[in-house]
Amino acid sequence: MADRDLIAEVEKLLSVQPSDHQAAYEWLRRNQRDFVAALEAAQRPPQMPGYPMALADFDGWLNHGDRGLSSNMIVAVITGVTDLPGKRVQASLHLPGDAGDFWRCENLLRAVPNAREHLDLVAAESPEWAALVEHWDELVTLDRDALTRRIKALIREVKP
């Protein structure tokens, strides 16, 4: 539901007669997730100076995506916002450690395609991230077991 439509519905609910309270309650219950997401989006900061994307660019993924520490880290690096809904992020500490983590990152990039253009910022966070970003296109092609082995090998290669 579009934010404008949601606001119109809420305005209607606020003006209902007492006899309609049950219907208003049912509507809010059915639309709770969209309502909460719209409220959270309204409270998000605008695009941070010096960062290529705003947190609002990630709203759909933040509210409905399969999120993990490493995918949250990508959002934090690209937006400059480390206090993401549900999680505070310490950027370089969160690497994808296995196939599941990696695919949460890749699914983020598929959900927000413009984010892929800024993986160079993520690569700049640490040598480990640089190695993963450099081999990203290869990693996407691997099956689950091979992917986990390759991620671990790439991280091992660059660790001091």
Image (spheres, rainbow, N blue to C red):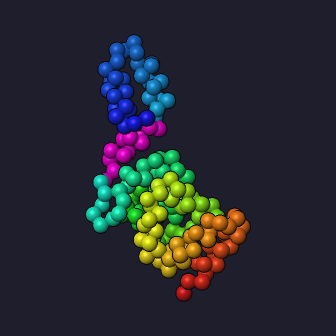
The x, y position of residue 26, in whole percent, is 47, 24
The x, y position of residue 142, in whole percent, is 67, 67
Location of residue 150 by image quarter: bottom right
* Residue drawn at (47%, 74%) of the image: 123
Location of residue 84 by image quarter: bottom left
Majority secondary structure of magenta residues: helix
- The quarter of the picture where the C terminus appears is bottom right
The x, y position of residue 56, in whole percent, is 37, 51
Residue 20 higher or lower than 109, as above or below: above
Q: Nearer the viewer, residue 80 or 14?
A: 80
* Residue drawn at (30%, 61%) of the image: 48
**Farthest residue, direction bottom:** 160
Q: Is residue 35 magenta?
A: yes
Region rendered in magenta: 33-45
Residue 65 higher or lower than 159, as above or below: above
Residue 31 higher or lower than 83, as above or below: above
* Residue drawn at (72%, 67%) of the image: 145
Q: Nearer the viewer, residue 40 or 77?
A: 77
Q: Is residue 121 magenta?
A: no
* Residue drawn at (61%, 81%) of the image: 156
